[in-house]
Amino acid sequence: MATAKKKLVQWEPTDIKKELLKKYPTKVARRRAKQILINEAQENTTPEITANVRTIPGIITMRGCTYAGCKGVIMGPTRDIVNLVHGPIGCSFYAWLTRRNQTDAGTDGTNYIPYCFSTDMQDSDIIFGGEKKLAAAIQEIYDIFHPKAITIFATCPVGLIGDDIHTVARNMKEKLGDCNVFAFSCEGYKGVSQSAGHHIANNQVFSHMVGENNEEKAGEYKINLLGEYNIGGDGFEIDRVLRKCGITTISTFSGNSTYDQFASAHMADLSCVMCHRSINYVADMMETKFGIPWIKVNFIGAKSTAKSLRKIAEYFGDQKLIDRVEAVIAEEMPAVDAVREEVLPRTQGKTAMLFVGGSRAHHYQDLFAEMGMKTVSAGYEFAHRDDYEGRQVIPHLKVDADSRNIEELEIEADPERYAPRKTEAELKALEEKGYKFKEYDGIMPDMEAGSLVIDDLNQYEAEKLVELMKPDIFCAGIKEKFSIQKLGIPMKQLHSYDSGGPYAGFKGAVNFYKEIDRLVNSKVWSYMKAPWQESPELSATYVWE
Ligand code: CFM
């Protein structure tokens, strides 16, 4: 049993890296070595990691596919748009309500999230083409629901047989008249991970919805919240805090979002980016086309939440808002501090490992730090080098066959609606005070020297890492959950939050402190033995033994 193995107490990061690579064939080891990094400053520069490259065949990756990033991640939380999957039923079924993006169905009650829409492709559609079936499905949806929009997602076979989903969408949009229909070429194989799907989705959202509604929106301080998906109700808590501060969210991309939010996003005066990986290019496009500046925020962690609120207030620069934000922080913090101080003696000094998508492995380090816990190893499934090393590397990113696959939109200033929200002088004055626009430094500068940063961690390496370093908690997703627990280590899902949450904002921090305290101080997993370990009923040998 793994837990019984000798623990490397005085481990050196170089030894760990060597151990992780030991079993691989030379070629694989050479490639993986570039994705496993010991975090150390080299003459004031962050070391370079290889990221956003294909997973080596044979390796059991934690990643998902491009379709998952498009359909599940970006469009999944949109409640009044019907998301229709063109493909075999499995692609829909396994994407049906598996991500915990919550919604409140609004005042109009329109909510298609609980439904599962698919063209249910059969052999004959693969052979003779599925376009007619797709058009019929769109018509059927329209007749039953009359939604504001219907979006179509290509699964792998659609790309392979060459169904022209964009033409079908265009024709149906014209035919229906009052329903926006558009499609995504987000076949699972389109990119190396779900990250490609984010980009495909966001490009289409930007081209087909953003800017459609020019009605003035009420509110004094109007923002877009980009890259917040309302997992486990995170978005509800962030909304509560923002509302309390008097800040109006014009749109959220895309947690608990509506068609109109996307259509009105250009009416906001500031874009706040939560998940840099999935959406930073939208923030750039909003600025180029409409003149809306953007900043990076983080509402994971109570201190980070306070910091982000202050950053928003500073941007608007209105004393009334600045005072209000301070009052809200002063009102919210005592309850947070009380729980933090209560758990601290039990959590202080414990260690964590975080391997999640493309931003949480970074954001959640703030929450753990608030509990006195150290992140000894972390990494993303599919983030790019800028999410590790900071945005300064963007001009130097390699364009390869896979990234060339993903369209970069050419955006220009809108001739009528481009309006800089601040004058050059105002922006400069803010920057001189140390205010940072469009800046994200990535995960590595925030991690301790000597910690292990690993891109696209796989099943084998995850188990090896836990076995060697014995963290007090391991955070990842459902695919990792049970294999880690079997090693006797508490495991917290940071994609779905298991069934917990919210963890964002002030109330979220309190939830997180309590839950992590319980997890890292419970010995249940280390006491447990599988039935076959206690009393093996069957034993066997291989014929060659
Ligand atoms: Fe952004 Fe996300 Fe994440 Fe992501 Fe995701 Fe997610 Fe994630 Mo799972 S958009 S990159 S593709 S923060 S679904 S809400 S938890 S892998 S770290």
Image: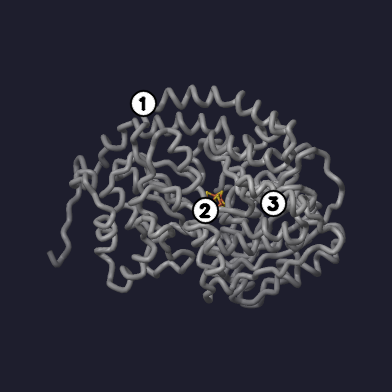
Above/below status of 75 relative to 168: above
Tag 1 secondary structure:
helix
Q: Is mark 3 within 8 Å of ligand 1?
A: no
Between 439 and 521, which is closer to the camera in this rendering? 439
Residue at which label 2 appears = 441
Foreground label between 3 and 2: 3
Mark 3 and mark 1 in contact? Answer it, CB < 8 Å: no
Residue sitting at 43 percent across and 59 percent down? 45
Between 488 and 40, which is closer to the camera in this rendering? 40
Quarter of the rendering occupied by the C terminus? bottom left
Residue at which label 1 appears = 345
Q: Is mark 1 within 8 Å of ligand 1?
A: no
Q: Is residue 416 visible?
A: yes
Query: Seen in the image, is 302 located left or right of residue 280?
Result: left
Q: Is residue 145 visible?
A: no
Foreground label between 3 and 1: 3
Residue sitting at 31 percent across and 33 percent down? 524
Where residue 408 sits, quadrant-wise, is bottom right
Above/below status of 330 relative to 19: above
Q: Position of residue 134 (x, y in %)?
A: 71, 66
Amino acid type, residue under disc 3 in the picture: Lys
Residue sitting at 21 percent across and 46 percent down? 10
Mark 2 to mark 1 CA distance (whole Å): 31 Å
Mark 3 to mark 2 CA distance (whole Å): 20 Å
Q: Position of residue 3 (x, y in %)?
A: 23, 44
Q: Residues within 10 Å of mark 2 (few under 14, many from 20)?
A: some
Residue at which label 3 appears = 428
Sequence-wise, the earlier of marks 3 and 2 is 3
Query: Seen in the image, is 471 located left or right of residue 368?
Result: left
Foreground label between 2 and 1: 2
Between 194 and 49, which is closer to the camera in this rendering? 49
